[in-house]
Image: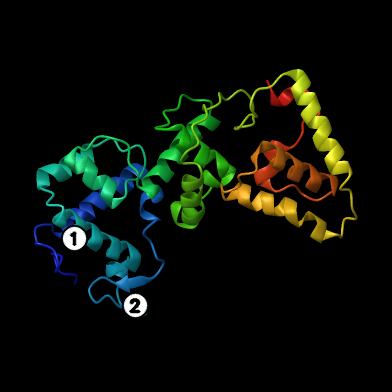
Amino acid sequence: MHPDLILNAAGSIPLRWVDEIFRRLSGRFGAQFTEKFRSGIIVDQRTGKAPNPSDSMDFAVDSGLEEAKKVWAEELDLAQITPDQIKRGLLARHQYPPSCDEFIRGCKGTDGASQDPEALFYRAQAEMGKRRARQAQNWPSSSLFWAAASLGNDLLHSDYRSMRGRWIAALDSNQHHVGDIPDVSDDVALPAPKMTREEAEVQIAQVKRATRSMTFPNDNKRRLEWAYAIADETARGVYKGGMHGKRMAAEAIRESRKPVPESLVPFLTKINPMEDVA
């Protein structure tokens, strides 16, 4: 059986306390909290080894989840968190599943927005979910909004483990993006910057002329490489070419009668020029 205390820590945080912390947070956030720790490898809690077919499954646990609990116990101990502070951490109104560092800050009653990428990811998921439901949002910064928006629907339909690389890249590329957060006015989560009717018509005409000049056979994939490169960089939140480049890429792919990547769909030219400026 696992030792009750962490060997390298001071020895004040029993694992059974962390079991209770995980139980409470799992009850509040469901699989969104526990799944980020699971490895899918089942071991016997008493031995740490894979159970035999004849063994009782009463002690079967996920190895990744158990290791996470041990790390949390050690980190809480090293941070000198007291039982009363753990109670404060459990009473804290976390808006998203906390990481270990976030929980420790809750135990200490630390104010201020977290800069932990994982915590920011779940905050962005929560706020973007409210946005899609046309509810009031509370973004801690416009740069977080633009990082979230650059990932499109992938943000809402993925977990942190699978999105970690793209999310950190999106945070980095948007850290200085201070543009206003646009109001949700239609089904497009990211409306284009406002412009006059004349400006919209001129831009649309330019994009259409450019894409018509690029018409090519459907099987000539090499001519589309630049457009797919823009789609990929847009999806990863690292494209710096601006709205015009994204529109050109989207139109070029559509003109070739190929499916437009999801990251470029919001930038397709609308039939009604004023749809983008409403």
Could you tell me which residue is drawn at 22 percent across and 73 percent down?
A: 46
195 or 267: nearer the viewer: 195
Q: Which quarter of the figure is the C terminus placed in?
A: top right
Real-space Cα separation, disc 2 to disc 1, in angstroms? 24 Å
Mark 2 = which residue? 50
Residue 271 as seen in the image, left or right of residue 2: right
Residue 143 as seen in the image, left or right of residue 3: right
Q: Is the residue 7 above or below the residue 252 in the image?
A: below
Dot 2: few (<14), some (14–19), or many (≥20) neighbours within 10 Å? some
Give residue 90's position: percent from left, percent from top: 22, 42
Q: Which mark is residue 142?
A: none
Which mark's residue is nearer the viewer, 2 or 1? 1
Q: Which amino acid does label 2 sit on?
A: Ala
Q: Is the residue 181 above or below the residue 5 in the image?
A: above
Q: Which amino acid does label 1 sit on?
A: Glu
237 or 98: nearer the viewer: 237
Proximity of marks 2 and 1: CB atoms separated by less than 8 Å? no
Could you tell me which residue is drawn at 90 percent across and 55 percent down?
A: 217
Mark 1 = which residue? 74
Could you tell me which residue is drawn at 68 percent across and 54 percent down?
A: 229
Could you tell me which residue is drawn at 34 percent across and 81 percent down?
A: 52
Give residue 69's position: percent from left, percent from top: 25, 60
Residue 65 as seen in the image, left or right of residue 192: left
Q: Which of the 4 image quarters holds residue 221?
A: bottom right
Give residue 188's position: percent from left, percent from top: 64, 31
Can residue 118 be seen in this snapshot? yes
State the scheme by which the image is colored.
rainbow
Element at badge 2? loop
Give residue 55's position: percent from left, percent from top: 31, 77
